[in-house]
Structure formats: C-alpha cells, structure tokens
Amino acid sequence: MRRVIVSGASRGIGAATARLLMASGWFTILMARNTEALQELAAPNPRMAAVLPADLANEADLTAAIRRAITEFGPVHAMVHCAGIMVTGSADNLSPADWRRTLDVNLTAPFIASRILIPHFRKNGGGHLVFISSVAAEEHFPGNTAYSVSKAALNKLADEIREEFRTDNIAVTTLMPAATATPLWDSSGFDTKDFTQPEDVANIVKTILESPESAIPEVVRLRRVKGNV
Ligand SMILES: NC(=O)c1ccc[n+]([C@@H]2O[C@H](COP(=O)([O-])OP(=O)(O)OC[C@H]3O[C@@H](n4cnc5c(N)ncnc54)[C@H](OP(=O)(O)O)[C@@H]3O)[C@@H](O)[C@H]2O)c1
C-alpha cells in the first residue's frame, strides 16, 4: 500500500487532500496540531489513516513525528507539505516575530521534513515531495510580505531538491494555488464563494501523486479562469 504524509491535514486544502487520498487507496498519515480534527478525519476510514500530531514550528516535534511515521507505518512514498500560515503586514509594520513564525511554518518545516525523508526515499528507490506554494510566490499582493517571501523561497527549495535528487528517483512538485475557500480567509472579510475550492486542489494533488515517473508535473500554477480575486 502506498503511504503519504499530509501536513496541515486538520482543515482546508490539507483536509480535502487527505480525505481524497484515503478514499483513493493511499494510507494517509495526518499531521497538524489539532489532534481532535485529525481524529475526526481519520475516524470513517481507520484502516487507511493514522494521526500524527506535531507542531511544525518546533523542530524537535516535527523531526520526531516524521521519524515516527517512518518507523511505525513502514516505508513512506510521498509527503504533501500543505501546512501554512498567512500573517498580513508590509515591511514597515510586520513584526519580526510574525516574520519568523511565517518562515518557520511555511519554509523551514518543509526543509526539516525533507531532510529526513530524502535519505528514506533514497533507500527505498524513490519518492515524491509535493510543496503547496501559492501564486503569491510570483506575484505582488499588498500587505502580504512574509507570506509571499516564504512561498517564493519554498519554490526555490523545491527547485534545489528536485535537481539534486533526480537521479535518486525523487520527484518534486511545486503546486501554486490561487485564492482557495478555506478557513485561512475566515477573518479576511472576503466573500470566498467564487474562490477555488479545496477539493479542486485536492484533485490536482492526487493527479500529481499518481503521475507516472515518465510524466511528473514539476511546477503547477492553479488559477480561476477569471484570474485572481
Ligand atoms: N487558501 C488559500 O487561498 C491558499 C492559496 C494558495 C496557497 N495556499 C496554501 O495552502 C496551504 C493550506 O492552506 P489552507 O488555506 O488550507 O489553510 P488553513 O485552512 O488555514 O489550514 C492550515 C493548516 O496548516 C496547519 N498548520 C498551521 N500552523 C501549523 C503548525 N505550527 N504546526 C502544524 N500544522 C500547522 C493547520 O493545522 P493546525 O492549526 O491544526 O496545526 C491547518 O491544518 C498553505 O500552505 C497555504 O499557504 C492557500
């Protein structure tokens, strides 16, 4: 059975992705801080899911969780790095603490998890890392400095890993969704009715993970036909 770790699985895009992967025959290891939400997601499908609570901003916690996933559930074939936070602010009013917190969750956590998974993938003949980035990696959205910088750097991290480890049969995909209707927008005041839906993104992640080795989508930009909101 193929096994995948999905971070940020407690809600939003991560939860939709985990739900779809579980239903599609992937043993799905659900990672986030909200244990109760993860248990609720796993409950209807106990043979296809495991709950792995972790704070991705805490290096020791994250490292222990990834190691536990490997030792407890057997070889891991893929990880979808979906956990992320968006703290608004421009360079003149963003607090250094919010800057660091954003980079810790959005950029450093995928690096820490990848540095453990790469040798594991290598030992097992390959693997697939999917990084959920954002169109904000490439575009300016006012008052979104830390988030945009974290996603641009995440794209570069993905590029570096992809080129370094191609010959080890490790596939790397960067997926950049546009505005998606999830709790991330809860306090924004935006009407999210016409946004991309989390299930739309989940379908693309499934396609990416199930792509043959001869045709890996490496960089995917996902946007509404009408463009940004
Ligand atoms: N929604 C959008 O418009 C949009 C667009 C483009 C890209 N994205 C990206 O898509 C990804 C998912 O976003 P979303 O919209 O689904 O957000 P969301 O609904 O706010 O969910 C964020 C997820 O990240 C987890 N998370 C946050 N901080 C964490 C931490 N310290 N440790 C462990 N888990 C943590 C949360 O779990 P806990 O709180 O339970 O820990 C939650 O499961 C993010 O990387 C985001 O940047 C979103």
Image: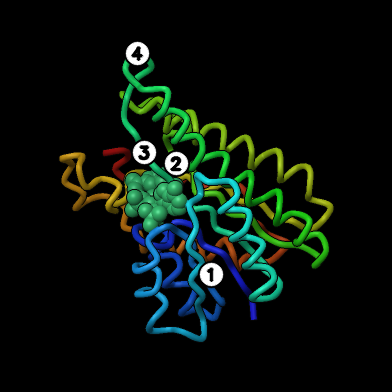
Specify the label residue 116 is tagged with: none
Type of the residue with mark 3: Met
Where does residue 123 sit, x and y in percent of width and height?
A: 83, 63
Distance of label 3 from label 2 (alpha carbons): 11 Å
Where does residue 187 sit, x and y in percent of width and height?
A: 20, 42
Distance of label 3 from label 4 (alpha carbons): 17 Å
Q: Earlier in the sequence, mark 3 or mark 4?
A: 3
Which residue is tagged 2? 134
Type of the residue with mark 1: Ile
**Vertical position of residue 25 compared to residue 215: above or below:** below
**Vertical position of residue 40 compared to residue 223: above or below:** below
Placement of the C terminus among the 4 image quadrants: top left
Residue visible at 48% across and 28% down? 149
Which residue is tagged 4? 92
In front: mark 3 or mark 2? 3
Query: Element type at marker 3?
Result: loop
Q: Are marks 2 and 4 in contact (CB under 8 Å)?
A: no
Where does residue 3 sit, x and y in percent of width and height?
A: 62, 73
Which residue is tagged 1? 29
Which residue is tagged 3? 86
Q: Which color scheme is applied?
A: rainbow
Placement of the N terminus among the 4 image quadrants: bottom right
Residue visible at 41% across and 72% down? 19
Q: Is residue 194 left or right of residue 29?
A: left
Q: Is residue 186 left or right of residue 95?
A: left
